[in-house]
Amino acid sequence: MNKVIQQLDWELIEYNQAWKEQEAIFAETISRKIQELKTENYLIFCEHPHVYTLGKSGDEQNLLLNYLQLQAKNAQFVHTNRGGDITYHGPGQIVGYPIFDLANFGIGLKEYINRIEACIIELLQQYNIQSERLEGATGVWLDTGTKQARKICAIGVRSSRYVTMHGFALNINTDLSYFGYINPCGFTDKGVTSLEKELGKKQDIAMLKAQLRKIFEKKFSV
């Protein structure tokens, strides 16, 4: 089992281009797995220009803008093949695409998502932010069980033969006003937040990526 995680940073990249490049790595990994060859694990970080993505189980009604309004906001709208409903990606957000062969780690999809959430929770603890899971929803949340419940990290994945793609979006210095034009992840009664909003100042994304990589390596080397 190969538990080594290779990190790639695509920096600012258009969503469809990143999706295309993910699919190529995903297909190659599955091909090698079918041939019983060694498979690699990639943790890809990037940021996207403004884009709304809708998962396979999503409802297009959760996008509250029409085409002209999307253009005015300089945003794209993409139907994608991950799980989950609608979310927003934009500059100032760490988007993580782990393309892992879960057989390398001896885990299934439920545990994989659980570990991603655990990685984000541990990262936020380093900034004295207490976060947690919300029953019935993926991702990482603050103040669950209160009227101030708000999401800081969305998760939506795809898997085939226990190889994963897509992943998570962690709000760092994100322009949260863009979430006002959707029902994030289908919720109409919960808010969103960012590290910048919680701490009151912009954060160093490069440093956060380095911290997150170390946490991923620790959580997935268990």
Image: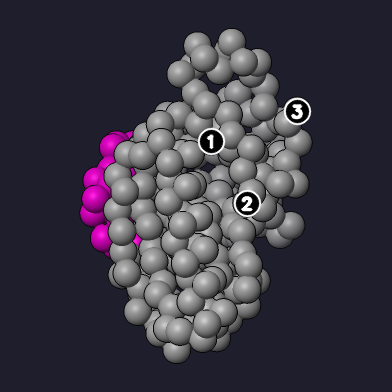
> Residue at 53% of width from left, 35% of height from top?
88
Q: Amino acid at mark 1?
A: Tyr
Name which residue type carries label 2: Arg
The residue carrying pointer 2 sits among few (fewer than 14), some (14 to 19) or many (20 or more) residues within 10 Å by Cα, namely many
Horizontally, residue 145 falls left or right of residue 2, namely right
Q: How far apart are labels 3 and 2 at the CA level?
A: 18 Å
Looking at the rendered structure, the kind of residue marked 3 is Gln
Q: Which residue is mark 2?
A: 82
Tell me the quadrant of the picture where the N terminus can be found.
bottom left
* Residue 100 locus on image (x, y percent): 48, 70
Is residue 69 visible in the rendered image? The answer is yes
The figure's colour scheme reads one colour
Which residue in the protein does label 3 denote?
61
Measured as percent of width and height from the top left, residue 117 is found at 53, 63
Q: Pointer 3: residues within 10 angstroms few (<14), some, or many (20+)?
A: few
Locate residue 173: give its quadrant.
top left
Q: Is 86 placed left or right of 216 in the picture?
A: right
Secondary structure, mark 2, is loop
Q: Main secondary structure of the magenta part?
A: helix
Q: Nearer the viewer, residue 84 or 181?
A: 84
Q: Which residues are magenta?
A: 195-212
Nearest-to-viewer mark from 2 and 1: 2
Classify mark 3: helix, strand or loop. helix
**What residue would you read off at disc 1?**
88
**Pick the front one: 180 or 75:** 75
